[in-house]
Amino acid sequence: MSNPRAFPPEADAELSAPAPSPALIAVERAISDLRRGGMVVLRDAERRAAIVAQAAEMTTAEGLRTLQKLTGSQPTVAVTRNRVAALRPSAAAASVQSLIPPTGSDVAWLRRFVDPTFRGGGEPDAGEGFERLSAIPEREGGLAHTAVRLAKYARLLPAALFARASAPEVERIAGWSRDMGLILVESAHVLAFPALRARRLTRAAEAEVPLADAEKARLVAFRPLDGGEEHVAIVVGEPDFSRPAPVRLHSQCLTGDLLGSLRCDCGEQLRGAIRILAAEGGGVLVYLAQEGRDIGLVNKLRAYELQDLGVDTVDANEQLGFEADERVYAPAAEILRQLGVRAVRLLTNNPDKMAQLAAAGVEVTGRIAHVFPPNRHNERYLRAKADRAGHLF
């Protein structure tokens, strides 16, 4: 590519893109409301059902009272099977399960239930009763499942407090939610949100930025038309996109990339990849806004706290209720498509990256091993990634 500005015509999608999608704007607003501790209304139009939901970790005593008052229903907490399994053995296979808090449960009880690092309300004891609660499997794609997904998108713990709307309220839910000042979101739009947002990424800005390890580099910023997180492609040198290009997909890591944390190898992977791309004569590093394997900075620090107590990186994520790795690579595939990259040689140790990128339509012709020596702080972490997450070293 002789001219770093010579991206294909489809990269100028922002000029001809359709107007922002009302559905995606509603989901973005719901995410923002949950992060502020607000409530949202989720509706399943097909099943004629609706709930009022709030992120469990943001619930207050007033929020508990308001939720019950708005719906007249008993609030229920929805968590993932990983969180249930961390509290007690569970035979339920459903990815999301709901539990009714015991009578008299307060906000501190709820926080201890959903957050293993919470210390503000005292330590759980035998009287907590977590192990005696009955877990109700929730339907995949149902409203409880959707509420948990929305909390994840908000980078909060994957747990939601919700109450079901009565039949009359469901019939007039649009007007009811408007009167209550609550955003109404369709569950189908929440579930489709990641893929739809990835498809609406557009190149927003670009500039030459000489780097310490690659003086010829260009940063291209992408953001979805409907708002949300921005990603950056670092185009190093003069990549030839007519052949499989060397590409690194790198997930944002504040502690490793910026602060030089020794708990992970992210900073070494980032700078090492840029050096390799420069030595190859050119390539692309896609820097994705997926902190902590896409659980967010706060939850990553919570996982670190659990690791300090002796669990490994996989178990820490799962005790918080997440999967071991929450990342999806549809945004990376769309960014590569807009840059004109059709086939890649991927710098990675993670087979899942290769599989997801291929499934998203990018040909992966090979892997470039991307390994760095461990140190005494990250040796256990790297071993867990290999033994538990299938990373190649």
Image (cartoon, rainbow, N blue to C red):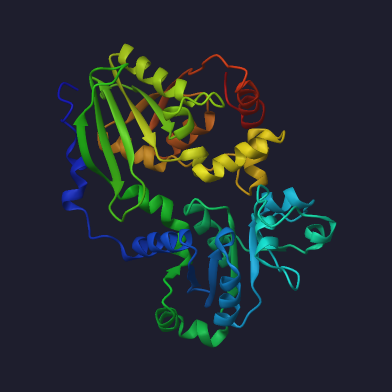
The answer, for residue 314, to whether it is visible in the render is yes
Measured as percent of width and height from the top left, residue 204 is found at 23, 43
Farthest residue in the right direction?
126
Tell me: 131 left or right of 317. right
Closer to the camera in the image, 264 or 274? 264
The structure residue drawn at horizontal position 46% and vertical position 61%, both measured from the top left corner, is: 36
- Counting labels gives 0
The structure residue drawn at horizontal position 65% and vertical position 28%, both measured from the top left corner, is: 384
Measured as percent of width and height from the top left, residue 354 is found at 47, 30
The structure residue drawn at horizontal position 46% and vertical position 64%, both measured from the top left corner, is: 188
The structure residue drawn at horizontal position 31% and vertical position 22%, both measured from the top left corner, is: 283
Measured as percent of width and height from the top left, residue 64 is found at 60, 72
Closer to the camera in the image, 54 or 58? 58
Considering only vertical position in the picture, is 287 above or below 118?
above
Measured as percent of width and height from the top left, residue 118 is found at 65, 51
Q: Image quadrant of residue 135?
A: bottom right
Q: Quadrant of the N terminus?
A: top left
The answer, for residue 94, to whether it is visible in the render is no
Farthest residue in the top direction?
279
Tell me: 30 left or right of 10. right
Farthest residue in the bottom direction?
168
Considering only vertical position in the picture, is 100 above or below 322?
below
Closer to the camera in the image, 192 or 326? 326
Considering only vertical position in the picture, is 16 above or below 27?
above
